[in-house]
Image (spheres, rainbow, N blue to C red):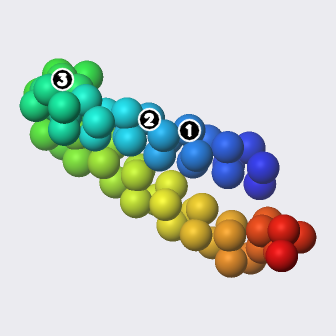
């Protein structure tokens, strides 16, 4: 469970870096890494949704911020 959460965090951070490169330079790094394959591009983009949903579940189920309050 912890490994899955760390992988999802890493995936979302990586997508954030790709989005920053696209926003600043106008170059879609993820599409370049997919070698122009639209299906691979969409499959990798869907991983961002899966990672975000997993982290949302983790935040609701385990409440890691409750000791802070």
Say whether marks 3 and 1 touch (CB < 8 Å).
Answer: no
Cα gap from disc 3 to disc 1, whole angstroms: 20 Å
Q: Locate residue 19: give its quadrant.
A: top left
Q: Which residue is mark 2?
A: 14
Residue 31 place in picture, x, y as percent: 18, 31
Cα gap from disc 2 to disc 3, whole angstroms: 14 Å
Say whether marks 1 and 2 touch (CB < 8 Å).
Answer: yes
- Classify mark 3: helix, strand or loop: helix
Which residue is rendered at x = 78% and y = 49% of the image?
2
Q: Locate residue 58: give its quadrant.
A: bottom right
Which residue is rendered at x = 40% and y = 52% of the image?
48
Residue 23 place in picture, x, y as percent: 19, 38
In the image, is residue 41 above or below residue 58?
above
Q: Which residue is mark 1?
A: 10
Q: Residue furthest front?
A: 69
* Relative side of 44 to 42, left or right: right
The number of numbered badges drawn on the structure is 3
- Classify mark 2: helix, strand or loop: helix
Lower position in the chain sequence, tag 3 or tag 1: 1
Q: Which residue is mark 3?
A: 32
* Relative side of 63 to 22, left or right: right
Q: The N terminus appears in which quarter of the rendering?
A: bottom right
Any part of residue 40 in sight: no
Residue 68 place in picture, x, y as percent: 84, 68
């Amino acid at each position: 469970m912890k490994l899955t959460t760390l992988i999802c965090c890493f995936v979302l951070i990586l997508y954030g870096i790709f989005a920053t490169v696209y926003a600043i330079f106008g170059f879609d790094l993820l599409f370049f890494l997919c070698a122009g394959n639209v299906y691979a591009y969409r499959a990798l983009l869907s991983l961002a949704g899966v990672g975000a949903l997993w982290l949302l579940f983790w935040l609701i189920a385990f409440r890691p911020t409750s000791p802070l309050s």
